[in-house]
Image (cartoon, rainbow, N blue to C red):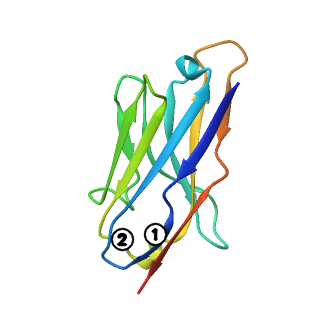
Amino acid sequence: QVQVVESGGGLVQAGGSLTLSCAASGDIDCISVMGWYRQAAGKEREPVASSTRVGVINYSDSVKGRVMIFRDNAKGTVTLQMGSLNVDDTAVYYCYADRDRCLDPKIYWGQGTQVTVSS
């Protein structure tokens, strides 16, 4: 079992920065990939960034160059630093942990944290 909790969302002006944090607990040694998705109102959930256990990182084209993801395997945490935010970044951001290194693989999601960018 893994529990995932996000924090750090809020309201920010366009052009500003925001850092989201995510902490996994439980079987953190069973986690391979941790990352972030987001879902804007009326749209499908889309990937933002991810980090494998060995440090392979992926960013979606929509955030590349404006976002950085940092992961600490020992602590089970992943941080998303976002800059040059625009109104299109407004969404609920969800952290996930892919517990697939052990028996009964499963993807665990956090409850989501709202990011609102004002113009």
Say which quarter of the image contains residue 61.
bottom left
Q: Position of residue 14 (x, y in %)?
A: 36, 79
Residue 116, x across and y down, in percent: 51, 74
Q: Nearer the viewer, residue 41 or 80?
A: 80
Mark 1 is on which residue type?
Answer: Asp
Q: Is residue 119 above or below residue 44?
A: below
Which residue is drawn at the image coordinates 32% and 73% (left, top)? 16
Label 2 secondary element: loop
Residue that numbered label 1 is attached to = 89
Residue 81, percent from left and from top: 35, 54
* Residue named by callout 2: 85
The image quadrant of residue 101 is top right
Residue 92 location, x and y as percent?
A: 59, 63
Q: Secondary structure at mark 1?
A: helix
Q: Amino acid at mark 2?
A: Leu
Taking the spot 56% from the left edge, 49% from the top edge, the residue there is 6
Quadrant containing the N terminus is: top right
Whether the residues at callouts 1 and 2 have beta carbons within 8 Å, the answer is yes
The residue sitting at the bottom extreme is: 119
Report how far apart the C-alphas of labels 1 and 2 lie in the structure: 6 Å
85 vs 113: above or below: below
The correct choice, above or below, for 5 with respect to 83 in the image is above
Q: Residue at x 63, y 13 (%)?
A: 102
Question: Badge 1: how crowded within 10 Å, few (<14), some, or many (20+)?
Answer: many
| Label 2: few (<14), some (14–19) or many (≥20) C-alpha neighbours in 10 Å | many
**Quarter-of-image position of residue 78:** top left
